[in-house]
Image (cartoon, helix red, strand yellow):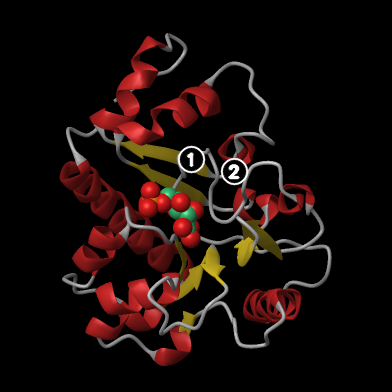
């Protein structure tokens, strides 16, 4: 657990760099899935200061608001401004979620097709991303997998349409996230305590707290600051570092 958000971002940077270098060493490239929201932005700004073989990184998004990349709410726009447009990143390696069809389902299918082509996987198969970054909302959602929504039930697709307050979003499905080699949650702030308590509880309804569904076949890291994670200190079945 990190003293504050700055320390959390520093810890996340170290872990992300380690995973990127390991993926490149083992597979020649790294498929990295970015989270949206506010928490990861300083991490992206720190990555922009690194000297990495950008041509060996492929960037994807785990979810996207249904707006153009130029819109202030765009997760792609945030990552481009903080990192990708600030370094010599090959344009072909940036795989933004399409949001221009004025039909979220059509754009979800387009992104699914792009992933299948990139990884060479056919229908029924799920690609394995090297590194998936996630945040968690105050309500326990992750990516755009919101509580009590139909997106939580989609298990035969890579990409589906989530929705928040009636607004459509594109999102990785639960089974696609759970294929990840390494999944890292970054969670900061006291406002996250109630949801964290439910996500780590012995029993709680994952439909009400969708981050509980994230049980990847690879590594799962929860990077927390004290403000968020202190609520877990009473959980004696957890090892908190
Ligand atoms: O599109 C989004 O908003 C994110 O993907 C979302 O899942 C985010 O990670 C959480 O809402 C946490 O957001 P914060 O990091 O701002 O707390």
> Which of 153/87 is in front?
153
Element at badge 2?
loop
Quadrant containing the C terminus is top left
**Horizontal side, residue 67 vs residue 76: left or right:** right
**Where in the figure is residue 6, as x and y percent of width and height?**
16, 47
Element at badge 1?
strand
Q: What residue sits right under mark 2 in the picture?
A: 216
| Quarter, ligand 1 | bottom left
Quadrant containing the N terminus is top left
> Which of 102/235 is in front?
102
Q: Residue at x 42, y 40 (%)?
A: 221
Total number of numbered labels? 2
Tell me if residue 114 can be seen: yes
Q: Residue at x 66, y 56 (%)?
A: 176
- Give residue 159's quadrant in the image: bottom right
Q: Callout 2 environment at 10 Å: few (<14), some (14 to 19), or many (20+)?
A: some
Q: Are marks 1 and 2 in contact (CB under 8 Å)?
A: yes
- Give residue 59's quadrant in the image: bottom left
Please say if 116 is above or below 41: below
Please say if 101 is above or below 199: below
Q: What residue sits right under mark 1 in the picture?
A: 220
């Amino acid at each position: 657990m990190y003293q504050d958000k700055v320390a959390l971002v520093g810890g996340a940077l170290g872990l992300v760099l380690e995973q990127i270098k390991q993926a490149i060493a083992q597979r020649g490239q790294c498929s990295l899935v970015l989270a949206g929201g506010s928490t990861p932005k300083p991490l992206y700004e720190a990555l922009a200061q690194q000297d990495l073989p950008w041509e060996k990184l492929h960037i994807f998004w785990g979810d996207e608001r249904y707006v153009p990349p130029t819109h202030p709410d765009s997760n792609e726009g945030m990552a481009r401004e903080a990192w990708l447009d600030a370094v010599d990143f090959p344009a072909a390696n940036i795989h933004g979620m399409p949001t221009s069809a004025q039909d979220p389902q059509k754009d979800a299918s387009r992104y699914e097709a792009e992933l299948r082509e990139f990884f060479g996987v056919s229908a029924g198969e799920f690609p394995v991303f090297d590194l998936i970054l996630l945040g968690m909302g105050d309500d326990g959602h992750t990516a755009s997998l919101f509580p009590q929504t139909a997106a939580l039930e989609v298990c035969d697709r890579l990409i589906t349409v989530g929705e928040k307050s009636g607004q459509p979003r594109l999102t990785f499905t639960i089974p696609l996230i759970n294929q990840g080699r390494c999944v890292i949650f970054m969670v900061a702030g006291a406002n996250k305590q109630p949801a964290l308590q439910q996500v780590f509880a012995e029993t709680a309804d994952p439909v009400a707290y969708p981050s509980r569904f994230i049980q990847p076949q690879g590594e799962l890291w929860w990077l927390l600051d004290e403000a968020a994670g202190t609520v877990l200190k009473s959980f004696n079945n957890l090892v908190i570092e």
